[in-house]
Each structure stands twice: as C-alpha cells, then as structure tokens.
C-alpha cells in the first residue's frame, strides 16, 4: 500500500499488505494470515526445486543491482565443503529509499521467512541480517520477531522440526552507506572497516570468512515466500512491459511530491501514473521538473522524460537512467538543482571509504567545485572539469560509489545546463532576485 | 559529521569497566554467533557506547583485549563508522537528515530550529546545559517521512521547523 | 602444477605460470606498469587504481595487480585510455599532496614524482581550494609520519599486519579525511617497523635517522651485507662524501626478501668513526711510532719468525672470510689456535617471512670464523695469552681484556687502536666492512659478497691484504698482496 497513505486501487499489494498494521508483527497473527506456510513447503520441496522456482520467478535484486536472485543462488557450490552463509542486506542507505525499513518494521516475519527459505536453499545454516545502525525501530521489531520464531521452533537447530539448522542473527551497522555494498557488508560483519573487496573472488566462491556466501536485499527476500507459495510462474506473470522484469516493486517516492510514501506496483508500470495519479503529483502550485527514479545514484531524467518511462529495468535504461533501488526522488520548479546536486556530492564525499584514489579525492573535489559555483565564483571551465572528473570516476574503482556521484552530477548538468550556467553567469540561481 | 566536537566536556568520574556482569554475558552470547572473535567488534562497541555514552580510549583498550585484537585495529574501525562517538556527547544525541530528499522538504530549517530550541551554539557542540548535541547526518532511510530526526534511539518522523519546540520540550 | 599460459602485453608475448597477475606478467615482458599499493611481499589491495590497464574485449579498465593473467589476453598499458586513467589518478593524488619536493627527503626516489614527470598533467586544475592539513606525527623510535603527503596506499598498514604480524598501524577515518593512525601512546617500535619507510612510495613515512641528511641523487649506492647479526641480509650502503649516510635493504629472495630489521638499518654509524688507525705503527723507544708498510711488514715478519709456539689468536667475527682464512693460515704457522667473541641480544623474527630474524649473535661472519677453524672458546684463549709465544689480534676492541704481559709480543691488526694494544710490537691498520670487498657466511651457510662503498682512511688496507702481505713477508703468502 502507499503507506502512509491508503492503498491505491492501481497498486498491486503483495509485500505491503500489512504496512501500518502493528498486529502483523505478532507471530500468532502472522501465522493466521498465512505466514510460514511457504517455509514449510520449501523445506519439503528440496533445495534444487526452491532455487528453480526462484529462477523461474525472474525476480531481480531489489537493492539496486537488479541481478536475478535465482541465478545468484545457483552460483553457490552444490557440494558443501565449507560453511555457507546467507546475508540479508538491510543497510538501506541509498538516498530516496525507505522501503526496507517499512518491510522490516511492519512485517518482520516476512523477512525472517524469506531469509530462512534462502538459507535452506543455499545450504546455509547461519544467516546474518545486516541492519543499518540508525534503524533502531526495525531492529527492535525484528529482534522481537526472531525471539518469537526461535521460541516457536521455526528457527534453531531443528527448524520447523525438519532436522535442518537455521540460525539468523541481526548484525547492527554503525553509520556507513558503503556497507550496503555487498562485499563491504561482509567486511563489516567480519568486524572490519566497511571497505568493498576486489572481485573476483565473488561472494559465492569466497565471501564471509572465505566461505561461499549469498547476499540478498530485504525486499528480494520478503518476496520469496510469495514465490514459493504461489509459484515462480505466477510471479513471472506479474509484468506489464518487459518479460525480463517481473513481480512487484515497492517504489519509495519522496522529495517534492504531494503524497510521499511507498507504492507497490507491478514491474513496467508507467512512471507518469505513479507520479501524478498514485502519488498525487506536484505540491500545490508547483510543477515537477526532474526525477531520479532509482535513488540518488541514478541519472536525473526530466519530468518530460519521466512521463514516457515505464518502471522496469529496461524501461529506465531506455530513457538513460536506471531502476536502481526504486527510491524515487522528485524535484520541482522550486528546487535549486545546483544546490541539491552539491548536497549529493557532499553525501558521496562523506561516505567514500577512502580506498580508491578517484573516489576519495574526486567526490570531495566535485563537491568543492559545486560549492564554488553556488558562491558565485564558478568559471566556464568548471562544467567541463566536472564532466572530466566524472569520467575519471566512472568504471575505474573497486565499487561504484564514485560512479554514482559522477552519474548524478553529469546527468544534472546535461539535463539542466541552464541552471548551472545561471550560476556561472549571474552568480545566483536562475530566476532568483 | 556525526561526531561531537572536542569542545564537549569530559566525564568527571572514572568510567566503569565495560565487560562485567550482564555486559560480559551479553558479549559471550554475541561471540557464540560468529566463528571469529573479531566479528563481535561492532556489537562490542555498541555495548561500550551504551554503557559509557561514548567510545573512550579506555573502552577501545578493553574491547581490544576482550577480542584479541590491537587497539590500533579497534581505532581504525571506530573512526570508520560515524555512529560511534569518539567524544562524550550531550544527554540527548540528535541526528537530523539533510541529504537531498529531506533537503527538499525543509531539513535545513529543522536543523536551525533545533539549534535554537536546544541552545546549542553550533552543530557537533554540546549545549551549555550538557543536555543536547545536534549533528547533521546523511540519509536516514525515512525519506518519505521528511524530515526524520533520530533522538537517541527514537526516530521521529515528519519533523518541521514549527514542530521542533514541542519535540524538544518532550525530551527535556 | 598446470601448464604456463601465454598472453600479449604491449605487443610482446610472455609465458607465465597460472595465477600470475597481469602486473607481474608485464614485468617479465619488460613493461613496468606504474603502481603504488601493490608490492610483491604484501597481499594485494587493488586500491590505488594506478595500475589500470586496457584488456581487449573487456569493457572496463582492469587493475593489473588484481587481475590474473589469462591465456590469449591482449593487454595495453600505454593506450590512450590507460594513460588517461593514470593521469587522472596522478591529478587526484596531487590535489591534497603538498608541493613539498624542495624539502622532502623522498625527492629523487619518489614514485609520485617519477610518474608525474612521466605522464602527469603539466598543471593541476585544482586551483584555489585549500589542501587538507594535518600536523606531522612522531610514530616512534625512527619513523615520522607526514599525513599531508600520504597517498593512502596502505602498504605500511599491510606490512605491519601481514608481514610483521603486529597490526599497530591502521587507516583512521573515511573519505578524504583518512590517514594512517597508530594507537595513542604506542610507539612504532616493532623490530622490523623501519621497513615501512622503504615501502612508502612517497615522503610520508620518513626515517628520522636520515631526515634532511642528504639528497638521494648525491648518494652512491653499493651492494653490501648487513653486519648487525648472522642473518646476513643483503643491503645497500648509501654514501655521500665518503660517509655512509643510509642503509637500505636489497631484495634477496633467499635471505631477507625486501626487508631488514631496525637494528641492521641503523647499524652503520660505526663505519664512519673518525678515530681510526691510519698508518702502520711499530714499537720504538717505548712507544708506537708511525711507519710505512715496508718497514712495518719487515718488523712483523721478524717478530713472527722469532716467536715461539704456541701463538694465540683473538679475531673478530665481523672480519671477512678472506681475512679470517689468512688469519688461520698465519696462526697455523705458530701452531696457534684462535677464538672470537660475539655480542648477543634478543632474537626478533619477522613473523610473516620464513627463517628471517634479527639473530641473537650480533656479528655478520660468526660462521665464516667457525669455518676458518676459529672457536667460541674466547675465555680459554684469553687465559692462554700469558703462556703464548705471540698474541695476534684481528680487529677486536680488547674491551675487558688485559694486555698480554711484557714478554709476550702482540701483533695487532685493526681499525682502531684500543688501550690494551698500546704495548703492541706492531700495529697494522685495516679497512672496515664498508671500505673493502669480501664475503660473509650467514647462519645457514650462505655466502654473500659485499663491495667497497667508501675509501679507507690514510694507509689502511683490507685486512685480507694486510694478512697476506705479512704471510708474503714470511715467504708463505699467496701472492695476493704485492
């Protein structure tokens, strides 16, 4: 549902059914509403069948990378010679995104069930739910749900009485956006600085403590029980445009929009309808000017481009942006785009882990140039410089944090050049007194 | 950005030893959940901060000893993660998100209002009465409920500059 | 062991064992890919991004230090894309790096300087923004850390963690605020910590011993062997104006890889002593007077011819094999035996390298001396002096040893003149390790050569030459000394 707003008829309510309902946190209520039947079923299906079902569903990583989850599970070794691990990535830090928080604090058992099924499928007996440190309420709620699940024997040495061990532990982060990157997340669990790792090796070969590991996003895992219960083919059929983008997606809409919130729609849903119909369009008296449909790390698109975008992985690529996490930041004609882009550059500079030269120095330099522009001291060469730095920061580093900074900055200059030129020419915002 | 400045006053009493009694049992339970002691580092630091309000050099030494790592190693981890305080902070530690989505919804006005209402002269500096430290933070993951403010462990949604005085009054 | 694979780097074909990185494969092809964080003795970090190369068929540039070579790979190091990427890294490194070259010790052997000259931009575009500033930190006995110059390659951190196995350095903070940290109140006093100064590609970690002493382009570098203990690490003696100003390790896969310990690193000042024997001396009228070599050797020969057996020898375990062999031949003429003594100290292994340690016996040629027939029975030898027909000393400082009694002549060959030798019949000046060519045998029986790094003072000659000259004067020489 478009929590905190009531469900819109055009939403496809799957994961968000119980948003806003504190009762859903309770195990007895959750079971009454059908909870843990999927886990029961999965434990009887056999792991290969579970993986096949998830592959058939076509679900792609909902954290932002969009990699097919079933294929990812299939990378895990068939023969277990070392412990296998599952990680649930609940480090939701991509600006604009706030869906995993809702899933965890309203439907913690959905997360637990998804994790348990995944752990079983990949032959992991231990799973770590990495929750960012600031998510104090989701952690409280999730821990209480875990305690209930253990008490009821759903988790533990004999999960659901089926003779398999499934243990889930919450690992609390401590303030680092970069720990949402899967290899940095693993380093953080291991008690290290959250530095992303060079790949290869990939996590399925050597992840946590050198052992085969799978990392999935909260939203991806929360969908797994539905896939098991109703079948991968059913999930695959939920697709309005491209058959390679299936299922439902929670879009977190925020910024200069009338009804910010999480809206759950089928993949391929028209962005124009999501913005103007479901989310109420611009604030009174305002016009939408720009959107970043997948979080601050995806290129800006203009309002006009947004109106012809279909919300799936391919549809976003077609207009030169990405679906990303689905954290949709909306900008209007009252927005100082230059200022907001500077603020994003500052975000990336703050969060850089410091390993790669281009990211460590480039994000900070980019922020400084934009701050200089905003002070009215910008020069014409500065825009070319920003493009050049953007190129140096793209495709050259261990992870894509610097690429994200570059994408936001260069796309904003490309799409809203007059705004930047106004600062260069007049030393102040376009149209400002 | 989330660190209190060096102007914050140090505690006047010596800090208690960290891993004794219930805290020791808590650490032992945590150690059982991981195959290495080092993996308990972030959880151990959370215990330390909960008990002492910040991560002092003494705390780092105790954590290092408990987990069999060097103090330098612990320090490298503490300084990486912004939520661990390296200096004492006010009774209430307030984090305000000002990243773009919230910035578009008046977050900077909320920051100004909080500084005024609490008497903090500037961000990162504890108020004269020792009760408040305000910092700007990066995206708190509650963008649709702008502006979110994390006061200690409570996330208050949809804070506006106007609603700040009443909010601050609740915590006095 | 699988078959080697062939790849092409900069148009040159090279065959390497599987598992070799592209960067190492490039070395075999004679191509040096610029890099900072990579070091053959350290685990791969892949973070400086300087070693990015273009590999045909791959959409993104690859970090060659972290990319395994694959059969048929075609790698381009000097393509426009790869060069542009390196130029970018250099520009980024220089935005906060201060223009300290005029006052920085690393100047002349700085990899940031070198690559910037090679392929950096003419001028930075960073302009008017301030540079990040942190004050210099004294890390401990010999190491200074200059945070402003640090390029965060983390070689020092990885060395301490993985090679020294003492993780006392860290990376502190995040982003462009990051810097190397050490535990407050701790010193970087690990016995092998000085290696971080060598590993640092720039002038961020500096040796206090070398601080502002000399410009590296004024230095002559000579291959030598460390005299600090019996490990026999390969070193470079670096000299300026006939003075040893610095010691650096030389790579040696069998003995010390890329490292030396702090004791050895700083154990060179004695080579520059100025209180040296500069001329041969002969006893005349109750005191020692200077003589030329001809007269002194004549006197020595006469002394030895008339001395009855047995002779007693006290030798230095720091003398060359050549000198010790000659000394043994000399003593044999008098049916003599010889002994040495060696200072000891605590052993300090470098945990991450097999069989590498600062050894307890603090002299370089204990095993050369043993091989030449000398023993550790020093006390017995000293006790035998009063009853000997002649005492022969090779460069021991005779501390705590009484001069032989009046009737026992003393032939002293050494670098300085100890008090106890003032009554010697003949004193012959010899060169020290830095002033001669020779060999040592280390504790594993490994023989290594060292070469002359500076001139010996006055008329001093290598001890091997001196002893052979004496033997020649006795008619028992090898002809080495002319």
Image (cartoon, coloured by chain):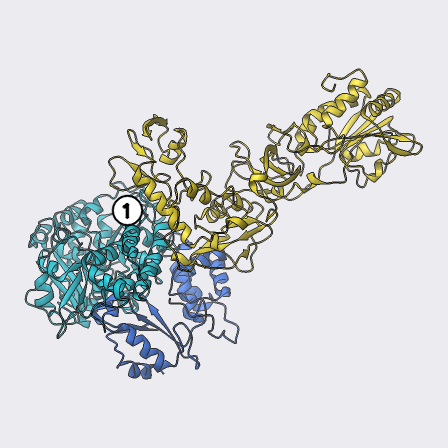
Using the image, name the chain to which the residue with label 1 belongs. A
Seen in the picture, residue A53 relative to C259 is either above or below; the reply is below
Which colour denotes chain B?
Answer: blue
Q: Is residue A151 visible?
A: no
**Between residues C312 and B139, which one lies in front from this camera angle?**
B139
Taking the spot 28% from the left edge, 76% from the top edge, the residue there is B109
Q: Is residue A111 visible?
A: yes
State left or right for residue B131 relative to residue A326. right
**Chain assigned cyan:** A
- Numbered-mark total: 1
Which colour denotes chain C?
Answer: yellow
Location of residue C437 by image quarter = top right
User: Label 1 crowding class (10 Å Cα cut-off): few <14, some 14-19, many 20+?
Assistant: some
Location of residue C449 by image quarter = top right
Indicate the secondary structure of the residue bearing disc 1. Answer: loop
Taking the spot 19% from the left edge, 67% from the top edge, the residue there is A254
Give the x, y percent position of residue A287: 13, 69
- State the residue position of label 1: A395
Seen in the picture, residue A317 relative to B138 is either above or below; the reply is above
Location of residue C441 by image quarter = top right
**Between residues A103 and A381, which one lies in front from this camera angle?**
A381
Give the x, y percent position of residue A131: 30, 61
């Amino acid at each position: 549902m478009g929590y905190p707003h009531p469900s819109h008829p055009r939403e496809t309510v799957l994961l968000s059914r119980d948003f806003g309902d504190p009762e859903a946190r309770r195990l007895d209520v959750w079971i009454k509403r059908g909870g843990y039947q999927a886990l029961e079923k999965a434990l009887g299906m056999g792991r290969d069948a579970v993986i096949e079902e998830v592959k058939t569903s076509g679900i792609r990583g909902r954290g932002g990378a969009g990699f097919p989850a079933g294929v990812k599970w299939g990378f895990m070794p068939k023969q277990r010679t070392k412990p296998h691990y599952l990680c649930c990535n609940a480090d939701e830090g991509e600006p604009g995104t706030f869906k995993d928080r809702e899933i965890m604090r309203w439907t913690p058992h959905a997360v637990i069930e998804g994790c348990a099924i995944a752990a079983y499928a990949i032959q992991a007996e231990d799973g770590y739910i990495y929750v960012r440190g600031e998510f104090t309420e989701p952690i409280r709620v999730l821990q209480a749900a875990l305690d209930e699940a253990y008490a009821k024997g759903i988790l533990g040495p004999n999960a659901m009485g089926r003779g398999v061990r499934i243990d889930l532990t919450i690992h609390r982060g401590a303030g680092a956006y970069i720990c949402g990157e899967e290899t940095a997340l693993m380093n953080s669990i291991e008690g290290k600085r959250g530095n992303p790792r060079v790949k290869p090796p990939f996590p399925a070969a050597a992840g946590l403590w050198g052992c085969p590991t799978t990392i999935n996003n909260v939203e991806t895992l929360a969908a797994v029980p539905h896939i098991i219960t109703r079948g991968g083919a059913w999930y695959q059929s939920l697709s309005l445009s491209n058959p390679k983008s299936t299922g439902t997606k929670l879009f977190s809409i925020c910024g200069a929009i009338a009804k910010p919130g999480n809206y759950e729609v089928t993949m391929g849903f028209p962005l124009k309808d999501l913005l103007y119909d479901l989310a109420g369009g611009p604030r009174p008296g305002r016009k939408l000017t720009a959107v970043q449909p997948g979080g601050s790390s995806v290129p800006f698109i203009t309002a006009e481009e947004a109106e012809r975008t279909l919300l799936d992985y391919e549809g976003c690529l077609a207009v030169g942006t990405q679906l990303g996490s689905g954290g949709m930041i909306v900008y209007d004609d009252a927005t100082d785009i230059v200022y907001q882009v500077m603020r994003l550059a500052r975000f990336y500079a703050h969060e850089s882990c410091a390993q790669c030269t281009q990211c460590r120095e480039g994000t900070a330099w980019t922020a400084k140039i934009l701050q200089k522009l905003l002070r009215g001291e910008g020069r014409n060469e500065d825009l070319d410089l920003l493009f050049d730095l953007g190129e140096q920061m793209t495709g050259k580093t261990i992870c894509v944090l610097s690429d994200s900074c570059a994408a936001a900055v260069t796309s904003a200059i490309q799409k809203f050049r007059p705004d930047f030129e106004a600062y260069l020419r007049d030393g102040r915002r376009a149209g400002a007194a | 950005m989330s660190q209190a400045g060096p102007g914050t006053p140090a505690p006047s009493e010596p800090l208690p030893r960290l891993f004794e009694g219930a805290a020791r049992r808590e650490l032992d339970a945590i150690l059982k959940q991981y195959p290495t002691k080092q993996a308990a580092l972030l959880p151990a630091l959370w215990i330390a901060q909960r008990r002492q309000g910040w991560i002092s050099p003494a705390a780092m030494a105790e954590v290092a000893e408990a987990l069999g790592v060097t103090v330098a190693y612990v320090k490298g981890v503490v300084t990486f993660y912004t939520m661990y305080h390296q200096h004492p902070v006010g009774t209430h530690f307030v984090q305000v998100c000002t990243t773009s989505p919230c910035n578009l919804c008046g977050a900077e006005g909320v920051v100004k209002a909080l500084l005024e209402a609490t008497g903090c002269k500037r961000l990162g500096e504890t108020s004269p009465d020792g009760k408040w430290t305000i910092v700007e933070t990066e995206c708190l993951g509650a963008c649709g409920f702008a502006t979110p403010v994390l006061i200690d462990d409570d996330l208050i949604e949809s804070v506006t500059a106007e609603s700040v005085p009443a909010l601050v009054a609740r915590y006095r | 062991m699988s078959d080697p694979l062939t790849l092409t780097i900069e148009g040159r074909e090279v065959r390497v064992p599987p598992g070799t990185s592209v960067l190492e494969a490039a070395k075999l092809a004679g191509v040096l890919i610029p890099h900072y964080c990579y070091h053959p003795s350290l685990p791969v970090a892949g973070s400086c991004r300087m070693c990015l190369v273009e590999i045909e068929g791959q959409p993104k540039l690859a970090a060659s230090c972290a990319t395994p070579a694959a059969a048929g790979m075609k790698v381009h190091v000097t393509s426009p894309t790869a060069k542009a990427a390196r130029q970018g890294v250099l520009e980024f490194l220089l935005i906060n790096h201060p223009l300290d070259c005029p006052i920085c010790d690393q100047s002349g052997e700085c990899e940031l300087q070198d690559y910037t000259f090679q392929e950096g931009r003419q001028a930075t575009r960073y302009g008017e923004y301030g540079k990040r500033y942190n004050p210099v930190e004294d890390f401990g006995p010999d190491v200074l850390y200059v945070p402003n110059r640090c390029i965060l390659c983390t070689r020092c951190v990885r060395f301490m963690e993985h090679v020294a196995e003492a993780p006392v350095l860290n990376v502190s903070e995040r982003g462009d605020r990051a810097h190397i940290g050490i535990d407050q109140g701790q010193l970087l006093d690990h016995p092998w910590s000085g290696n971080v100064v060598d590993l640092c590609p720039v002038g961020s970690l500096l040796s206090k011993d070398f601080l502002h002493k000399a410009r590296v382009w004024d230095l002559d570098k000579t291959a030598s062997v460390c005299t600090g203990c019996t490990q026999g690490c390969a070193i470079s003696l670096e000299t300026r104006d006939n003075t040893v100003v610095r010691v650096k390790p030389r790579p040696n896969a069998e003995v010390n890889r890329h490292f030396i310990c702090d004791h050895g690193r700083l154990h060179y000042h004695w080579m520059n002593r100025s209180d040296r024997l500069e001329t041969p001396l002969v006893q005349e009228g109750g005191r020692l007077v200077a003589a030329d070599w001809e007269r002194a050797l004549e006197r020595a020969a006469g002394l030895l011819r008339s001395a009855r057996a047995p002779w007693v020898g006290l030798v230095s375990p720091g003398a060359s094999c050549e000198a010790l062999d000659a000394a043994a031949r000399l003593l044999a003429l008098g049916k003599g035996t010889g002994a040495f003594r060696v200072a000891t100290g605590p052993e300090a292994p470098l945990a991450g390298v097999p069989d590498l340690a600062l050894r307890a016996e603090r002299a370089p040629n204990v095993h050369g001396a043993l091989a030449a027939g000398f023993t550790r029975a020093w006390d017995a030898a000293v006790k035998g002096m009063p009853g000997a027909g002649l005492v022969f000393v090779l460069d021991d400082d005779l501390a705590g040893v009484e001069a032989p009694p009046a009737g026992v002549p003393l032939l002293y060959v050494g670098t300085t003149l100890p008090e106890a030798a003032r009554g010697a019949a003949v004193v012959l000046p010899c060169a020290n390790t830095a002033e001669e060519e020779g060999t040592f045998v280390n504790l594993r029986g490994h023989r290594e050569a060292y070469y002359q790094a500076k001139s010996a003072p006055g008329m001093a000659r290598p001890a091997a030459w001196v002893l052979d000259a004496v033997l020649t004067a006795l008619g028992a020489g090898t002809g080495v000394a002319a």
